[in-house]
Image (cartoon, grey):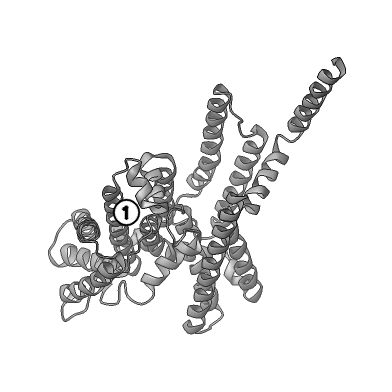
């Protein structure tokens, strides 16, 4: 009897030793591999795709990876990227907004008309454009919540109506030039972060990750729960800091990091916090995953849908204002062409699910960099825009396929 009772004790001690040996960086790597096997791919596919795209274009034309070209890429990516950030919100709840391009175009026309033609202060003109976006989003929410109109139909009707309003507002001239040398045009075309400040900014994400991670570890240990390894946390923070400092150093070799891209990144960080660390963000995921279950859990489903549509339209308006600043004009072509499709494609390529309930703000950042990299690389190779559309469409299709396979893998893993 004594031997029988002692043997399990020895086995438990050995398992404890084995677990302790697997803590640290090795445990972090093992955990990441397990997540990928279970279908939780995160941003891995888009990062791998971006590395492949940059390697191919950098090999075909070394100028593609020059610091000057990458700075221009960040300038161009910021406007549609902000619009895509709004698309992430509506996709999270399983809906869509097809009118973001038209809203962005009308917002740019509205700023031009109020600021240049009517003499309004530029800040008030921008605020008016954002309020307009909020009103349009509220209308979509009312049509969806009260009348049950599918968002595909309501936003398609909005696309046509707002485009008509844009053409009417610009009138016979068809365009309004914004004053060169103005603060908003300089912001969209010239202003970059001072070099010392860029290095300071590059430190912030790693430091925040470190302190936030330590807080999580402390809380979980106080609750007698398993906690992430300190070694893995430090390794992640150091890796991110080194990567961002290198990016800042490389871009500072020429023009530097655009302030407009910095604004985009700040908005991404704010939205990521809102989507992952607040009750509202958890409600967004719940509604997108199962609307009826969310309603039974006491979530105000109508309010969640309203917030998604309003944020999407307001981000579209802000993107349109920045696009006008980038081009120093508001024209009938603003918001047309591939703006709509690129904004939606960026969110999906970056990892936001078309099926709702899963996504993050960083998908807009990663997705638009992929799309803008393809556009920039093909332009530098002097290839036609037709090829750009085909390649972007293929990348979008691959992203949706990967998402579908990941969902299937997670479902089978859950059943197992």
Q: Quadrant of the N terminus?
A: top right
Residue 99 locus on image (x, y percent):
29, 68
Classify 164 as above or below 74: below
Mark 1 crowdedness (10 Å alpha carbons): few <14, some 14-19, many ≥20: many
Q: Residue at x 74, y 30 (%)?
A: 20
Is there any visible trace of residue 23 in the rendered image?
A: yes
Q: Residue furthest front?
A: 1
Q: Residue furthest left?
A: 118
Q: Is residue 383 left or right of residue 150?
A: right
Residue under pointer 1: 308
Q: Residue at x 20, y 55 (%)?
A: 131
Classify 129 as above or below 162: above
Does dot 1 land on a helix, a strand or a loop? Answer: helix
Q: Is residue 194 left or right of residue 151?
A: right
The foreground one among 249 and 335 is 335
Residue 252 locus on image (x, y percent):
54, 55
Which quadrant would residue 53 be assigned to in this image? bottom right
Residue 238 locus on image (x, y percent):
63, 41
Q: Residue furthest right?
A: 3
Counting every numbered tag in the picture gives 1
The foreground one among 241 and 338 is 338
Q: Residue at x 41, y 61 (%)?
A: 81
Is there any visible trace of residue 179 in the rendered image?
A: no
Classify 311 as above or below 298: below
């Amino acid at each position: 009897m004594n031997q029988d009772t002692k043997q399990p004790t020895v086995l438990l001690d050995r398992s404890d030793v084995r677990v302790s040996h697997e803590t640290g960086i090795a445990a972090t790597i093992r955990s990441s591999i397990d997540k990928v096997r279970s279908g939780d791919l995160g941003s891995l596919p888009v990062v791998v795709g971006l590395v492949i795209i940059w390697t191919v274009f950098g090999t075909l034309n070394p100028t593609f990876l020059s610091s000057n070209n990458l700075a221009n890429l960040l300038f161009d990516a910021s406007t549609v990227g902000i619009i895509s950030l709004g698309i992430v919100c509506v996709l999270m709840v399983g809906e869509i907004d097809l009118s973001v391009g038209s809203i962005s175009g009308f917002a740019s026309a509205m700023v031009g008309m109020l600021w240049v033609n009517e003499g309004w202060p530029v800040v008030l003109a921008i605020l008016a454009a954002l309020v307009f976006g909020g009103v349009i989003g509220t209308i979509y929410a009312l049509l969806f919540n009260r009348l049950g109109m599918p968002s595909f139909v309501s936003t398609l009707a909005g696309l046509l109506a707002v485009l008509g309003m844009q053409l009417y507002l610009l009138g016979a001239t068809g365009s309004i030039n914004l004053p060169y040398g103005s603060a908003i045009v300089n912001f969209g075309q010239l202003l970059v972060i001072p070099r010392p400040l860029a290095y300071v900014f590059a430190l912030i994400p790693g430091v925040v990750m470190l302190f936030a991670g330590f807080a999580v570890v402390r809380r979980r240990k106080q609750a007698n729960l398993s906690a992430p390894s300190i070694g893995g946390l430090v390794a992640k923070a150091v890796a991110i800091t080194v990567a961002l400092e290198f990016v800042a150093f490389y871009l500072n070799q020429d023009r530097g990091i655009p302030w407009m891209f910095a604004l985009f990144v700040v908005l991404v960080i704010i939205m990521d916090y809102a989507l992952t660390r607040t009750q509202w963000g958890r409600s967004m995921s719940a509604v997108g995953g199962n609307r009826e279950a969310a309603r039974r859990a006491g979530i105000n489903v109508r309010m969640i849908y309203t917030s998604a549509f309003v944020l999407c339209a307001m981000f579209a308006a802000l993107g349109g204002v920045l696009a006008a600043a980038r081009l120093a004009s508001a024209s009938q072509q603003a918001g047309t062409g591939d703006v709509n499709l690129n904004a939606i494609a960026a969110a999906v390529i970056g990892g936001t699910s078309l099926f709702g309930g899963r996504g993050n703000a960083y998908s807009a950042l990663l997705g638009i960099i992929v799309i803008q990299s393809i556009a920039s690389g093909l332009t530098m190779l002097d290839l036609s825009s037709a090829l750009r559309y085909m390649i972007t469409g293929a990348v979008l299709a691959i992203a949706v396929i990967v998402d579908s396979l990941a969902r299937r893998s997670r479902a089978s893993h859950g059943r197992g």
